[in-house]
Amino acid sequence: MNAVTATATDAGHFDVLIVGAGISGVGAAYHLRQQSPDRSFVVLETLESFGGTWLTHKYPGIRSDSDLYTFGYRFKPWVGPPIATAEEILSYMGEVIEENDLAPHIRYRHRIERATWSSERNLWTIEAVRLDTGEPLRFTANFLWMCQGYYRQSEGYTPEWAGMDSFKGRIVHPQTWPDDLELKGKKVVIIGSGATAATLLPNIADDCGHVTLLQRSPTYFIPGRNAIDIADQLRLLEVDEAWIHEIVRRQQLYNQDLFTRRSIDEPEVVKAELLAGVSAFVGPEITAKHFTPTYRPWRQRIAFVPDGDIFQAVKQGKASVVTDEIDRFTETGILLKSGETLEADVIITATGFNLNVLGDIDFVVDGKPLDFANTVTYRGMMFTGVPNMVWVFGYFRASWTLRADLIADFVCRLLNHMRDKGVSKVEVALRPEDKDMALKPWIDPENFNPGYLMRGMHLLPKAGDKPEWRHSQDYWREKDELPLIDLDDPAFVYGGKAEAETKAA
């Protein structure tokens, strides 16, 4: 990374600087305008437009893996099918931006390279590069709202397998899908077993000569109709869409809570139900051989499969599944540890992504580089030793945006509380009763252990053994707990005299 030089152009001061114009950043901008309208703010986005994941991912069939009644914002009714395409999600986000006049606040093609906090000035200095001109820019801000997500958009994760250089076909990661990839009549192998692989397979099966899903171990899926009965019934009755959104959202959240708790309390029963759903499409033999995971439900994310499309492709013979491990790549395909060879013209590595903590930005706090792993998290959103900053990290077992909305409420309440106290600085610190608290990994791997998290756990902050020092991953608790956080609890340390705030842009 090239640091921005001292000749950077002054790009202005803002009360709040939001990093990222994806689902979290756009939501943050909306909530800030609604709940703290006296604050000036800017949203800096590296890409050429809004959307984040839904803009960068171009692979065939890209869609949500959870319903838009909960993945959508609470304030903006969703009127389409519950599982939505990237195009539909981008359209929805565009409406939020247009309806709330957020566009003037967003600056695209601005890559942040360094963020420096000064306790002397109680100020963040943000050094960025405008990618369309190469111009170095410098912003200052009182508060940083990190909405950049948690994985590296520019590259996906592909393991290093022996012989990859010898393969004479193309190796493609879905995250960087090439425009010129031709699959017509080709033998294609997809490596992976998660939501991306399940989405890709049925969306390329009709073009390929044949597509094979190669997985080391199976994943749980929920096949079903891409519709919600109660939503359809309410629309027949011409109920207002805002009411429909709220009713369906509450129903979905109730059902998700019940399912999550059952996965823990009666995992074998839930496992049997999930496998029965798959077996209805492909039969018990294929289900037992290729779609029966060894772990209990919800130790990894479970994707909804609309209309069981991946299973229909397998049943119709357009696709096949192989459960095995890779020995090495060959010139013409993949040699498996069983001794079988999979012939391929194209190999797609749907093998996950790289955890990216704080957006590849160099953070410096009072002259010292920030090692995020040496901090302790406050409820997964603030961090010891890091003033005036909140990070949005959503849920694994529920829709990401649910937490983005909750954190937005918290941030706006915190900013308003600081204004009322007449202070310019807030950070979290362990209280005397927390000093001997046992520290643990960010997420308990016994409860949730996807590969990207296990590979990157050493980069993440520590968690404590008390609720306020953990990222609970439990929306159904946090929806009640976060609004009740006592902002004068000793865990919050305030300081600095507030300067006159800039006018809202």
Image: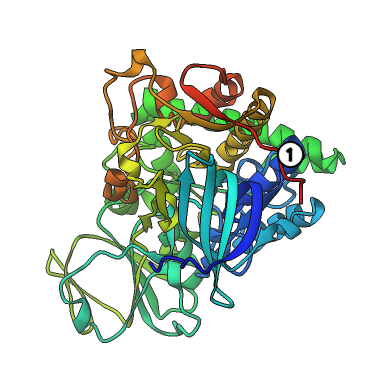
* Rendering coords of residue 461 (x, y %): 35, 38
Q: Residue at x 68, y 49 (%)?
A: 41
Which type of secondary structure does the marked residue at label 1 adopt? helix
Residue closer to the observer: 185 or 84? 84
* Rendering coords of residue 479 (x, y %): 58, 26
Residue closer to the observer: 116 or 227? 116
Q: Residue furthest right?
A: 238
* Rendering coords of residue 51 (x, y %): 61, 59
Amino acid carrying mark 1 in the image: His
Q: Is residue 437 above or below residue 182?
A: above
Q: Residue at x 39, y 66 (%)?
A: 155
| Left or right, 176 with reference to 142 | left
Q: Using the rendered view, name the quadrant where residue 468 is placed.
A: top left
Q: Residue at x 66, y 49 (%)?
A: 14
Q: Is residue 212 above or below residue 284?
A: below
Residue holding disc 1: 245
